[in-house]
Amino acid sequence: MSDIELQARLETVEIRLAHQEAALDEMTRALLEQERLIREQAETIKRLEVQLRASAASMIASRDEETPPPHY
């Protein structure tokens, strides 16, 4: 293999590596954005759950509010 052929192969490998590094950087940025979005959504769900629990009346009355059964 001549020096010219080796140089051409080396340049090809370097180009491919540069493209792979760029793709990896892009995927990393996308992953970080997705993680941020998921974190925000989880916090929103927690807040909504707290609000829902606070606003919804319990389906079961407390013992003080419960009327005695008819046989008493």
Image: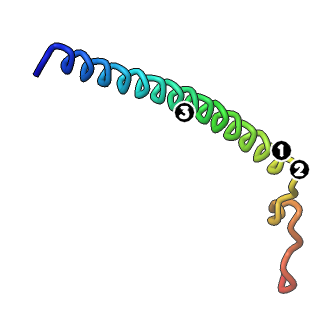
Position of the N terminus by quadrant: top left
Of residue 63 and residue 20, the one placed in the foreground of this image is 20
* Separation (CA) of disc 1 from disc 3: 30 Å
Tag 2 residue: 55
Q: Of the residues shown, which amino acid type is indicated by label 1?
A: Gln
The earlier-in-sequence mark between 1 and 3 is 3
Do the numbered discs 2 and 1 sit on residues whose CB atoms are within 8 Å? yes
Asked if 70 appears above or below 38 in the picture, the reply is: below
Residue 7, image x, y percentages: 23, 15
Q: Residue at x 84, y 80 (%)?
A: 69
Q: Of the residues shown, which amino acid type is indicated by label 2?
A: Ser
Q: Nearer the viewer, mark 2 or mark 3?
A: 3
Q: Secondary structure at mark 1?
A: helix
Do the numbered discs 1 and 3 sit on residues whose CB atoms are within 8 Å? no
Q: Secondary structure at mark 2?
A: helix
Q: How many marks?
A: 3
* Separation (CA) of disc 2 from disc 1: 6 Å
Tag 3 residue: 31
Of residue 10 and residue 55, the one placed in the foreground of this image is 10
**Left or right, 72 with reference to 39:** right
* Separation (CA) of disc 2 from disc 3: 36 Å
Tag 1 residue: 51
